[in-house]
Image (cartoon, rainbow, N blue to C red):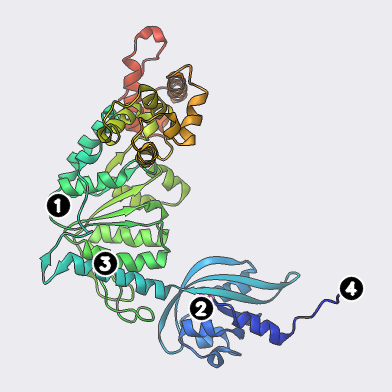
Amino acid sequence: MMQPHTLSKEMLMAILDGIDEAIHAVDKDGITIYYNKVAAGYDGMKVEEVLGKHLLHVFPSLTDETSTLLKVLKTKKPIYHENQRYENKKGQLLETVNTTIPILNGNTVMGAVEIAKNYGHINTLSNKLMDLQAKIHKSDGIKKVSSFHVSYSLNDFITNDPECINMLQDAILFASSLLPVVIWGETGTGKEIIAQGIHYQSPRNGGPFIAQNCGAIPGTLLESILFGTEKGSYTGSVDRKGLFELATGGTLFLDEMNSMPLELQSKLLRVLEDGFIRRVGGTSAIKVNVRVITAMNEPPDICVEKGCFRADLYYRLNTCPIYIPPLRERQHDVRLLLEKKLQSRIAYPLPKTITEIFQSYPWPGNVRELINTIEYVLLKSKEEIISSKHLPTKLNNSIKSVRQHTGSLRMELQKTEELMIKSAMNQTEGNVLKAAKILDIPRQTLQYKLAKMQEKPKSDGSAEYSAL
């Protein structure tokens, strides 16, 4: 039987030094007991400058509250992916994202170990990309066509749905003002088309249109992207404009707004109120002139209730709200999109059964999923007439249970919807606003659905409610 080998200190050090991550460990008193070369490279220090010294002695800008290592020693609880900005002993400003774990012996804290990722490097790469965009946008003071200009107008939102037509009329009205707009709808409904369309229709259509997804990158990186940086704000940083400065005179579109960290939301609120930004690491206020359009895939009031969207920012941004209904509630639009995107590219009439299959599918990915499916079908069918064998499995499966009763699923969904609306209206004694909250839909949507129910013959049992 083989005897287990004890891991020697030398072997442990060799393993840790071979890991391509910054690792920093302290004892229960905050004295550094391990600090690898990667961490030293991140911090612009030498290993011997840190090893054996108290954390706050080497990084004097940190405190018991801002140091993730010292915080873990105090709470005994791990911290995952927390941003930290600090200066080293040489006065260089550093920016990392840390995962910090307590070292416990039973319930006794023996120390803490931290793995850090250097977001200064990512910031640098991001800013280089922004530099390239800025150079494309302006050269010798002459504006050029670039990614800062729109590709869509409101005419590119294809619909014959009454609710969407009303939505487009609102968008045209909102475009004529400079008020902030909030667009919400499920993923793939076309929020950026509406945002670009509003910009294109607005008096600012000669200025840049810049879009930024707030959920795709960490908060500290997003802050420098939005507001820019001053030289020395972190290792390798230079004076650089952020998106607010680049978008001056135009529109800044912030997608997935509810994913933006709350601290950054408060800074955005200040910009909206006074029109000034301050670059990361800077002290001077810079005047900007930007119209902000935001988007999210959940109702803004629900995001406020969940705590991921500041109430004060919601009330500041929600001046002009726009809701885009999902495609499953716009069955006629499925046919219209098929005619525009598929029928126009084939030399024969699309078989009726194929249209019915497309209309029976709920399209959880909305218009984006429909367009991608059309491209798939065209690729599969090649020169053949489109049939069910060319459809993706998800469409064929969706039709199996209703093949002999085309349209029954839609009818059952409509009946269920009407029953839920009646129940909510009865619960709230006819108060449309309260009923809309119960149903988790916008008040305008409920008013529209109530109006449609009232248009039915009274023999169908529909209750009459005021939509006002």
Q: CA distance from mark 3 to mark 1?
A: 23 Å
**Which residue corresponds to mark 1?**
205
**Which residue corresponds to mark 3?**
277
Q: CA distance from mark 3 to mark 2?
A: 27 Å
- Image quadrant holding the C terminus, namely top left
> In terms of image quadrants, where is residue 174?
top left
Position above or below: 416 against 121: above
- Along the horizontal axis of the image, is 409 left or right of 447? right
Position above or below: 194 against 394: below
Q: Give the residue type that dot 1 points to.
A: Asn
User: Residue 60: in sight, yes or no?
Assistant: no
Which of the two discs, 3 and 2, labels the residue nearer the N terminus? 2
Which residue is painted at 56% across and 74% down in the image? 115
Which of the two discs, 2 and 1, labels the residue nearer the N terminus? 2
Which residue is painted at 37% across and 57% down in the image? 214
Q: CA distance from mark 4 to mark 1?
A: 79 Å
**Which residue corresponds to mark 4?**
1
Which of the two discs, 4 and 1, labels the residue nearer the N terminus? 4
User: Residue 448: in sight, yes or no?
Assistant: yes
Q: Nearer the viewer, residue 351 or 326?
A: 351
Q: Residue furthest top?
A: 459
Q: Nearer the viewer, residue 207 or 457?
A: 207
